[in-house]
Image (tube, rainbow, N blue to C red):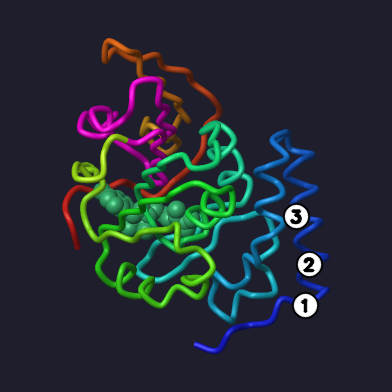
Amino acid sequence: MRKPEDTYRHKGLRKKLVDSIRDKGITDEKVLTAMMNIPRHFFLDTALQDIAYEDRAFPIAEGQTISQPYTVAYQTQLLQVKQYDKVLEIGTGSVYQATVLAEMGTQVFTIERQKKLYEKNKHFIFKSKYPNIKFFYGDGFEGLPTYAPFDKIIITAAAPHIPPKLLDQLKSGGKMVLPLDEGVYQRMLRITKNEDGSYEEEAFENFSFVPMLKGKS
Ligand code: SAH
């Protein structure tokens, strides 16, 4: 695919979007700067490029979505990432969330269960700019035992429960952010793992995600 342009108009729209997310209550400037640096319109089909800077979710391939920018900012802020953190992401989708994490200097391991999306992401447009994103095809419920433990884990699909294997793969003191399925909406949770393997749970706002599904497709 031909690389789209990032024009002054796009940058202006992006600044407006980032300002609106700040107005909605996101305070972590590192998250906002990362989002300011990433041309979101590169992550959407050409037909959707003009609306790429509206604060809403959009369809991507295979009936999946690119999360709403506010939601991406919200989850990323809750994750409290530091440079060089090892982060596991469940649900690669459009790669936008993974790119925000990579832009913040973390090492991202991202898993997608849909083969077609995984294959598409082999041609990820910023591959050379973000060698710190590693792509995996698999079931997020299983995590990536070979690369564990992780400092942070982020689930970007509605989880029916806290996946026990992911909890195992979290470092002690590590954090996992996930939308927990409670029907149409999900409650955003942040789990902090204690030294003894037990964990603390904090609950935040409600969101709406596509479901986290078992197995590969
Ligand atoms: N983080 C993505 C959001 C994509 S939507 C972005 O920034 O665009 C959620 C994604 O999770 C979908 O692509 C879906 O196929 C994927 N998914 C759902 N269940 C999964 C599972 N068990 N393992 C891995 N990926 C899963």
Going by the numbered disc 3, the residue's amino acid type is Leu
Image quarter hosting the C terminus: bottom left
Name the foreground residue: 196 vs 70.
196
Q: Residue 52 appears in which quarter of the rendering?
A: bottom right
- What residue is shown with label 3? 17
| Residue drawn at 70 percent across, 63 percent down | 53
Q: Classify 65 as above or below 124.
A: above
Mark 3 or mark 1, which has the lower sequence index?
1
Q: Is residue 187 left or right of residue 46?
A: left
Image location of residue 126, percent across then percent down: 52, 71
Image point 29% across, 29% down: which residue? 162
> Are the residues at dot 3 and dot 1 in contact (C-beta closer than 8 Å)?
no
Q: Is residue 150 above or below residue 20?
A: above
**Residue lying farthest left?**
215
Q: Tell whether circle 2 marks a residue whose Cβ is less than 8 angstroms from ligand 1.
A: no
Tell me where the magenta segment starts and ends, as one range: 150-177
Question: Is residue 173 magenta-colored?
Answer: yes
Q: Residue 197 in the image: x percent, y percent?
A: 26, 15
Decide if residue 135 is on the left or right side of residue 26: left
Local secondary structure at mark 1: loop
Residue labelled with disc 1: 7
Taking the magenta stretch, the answer to whether it contains residue 162 is yes
In 3D space, how far apart are the residues under numbered discs 2 and 1 (Cα atoms)?
6 Å
Residue corresponding to mark 2: 11
Q: Which mark is residue 142?
A: none
Mark earlier in primary sequence (2, 3): 2
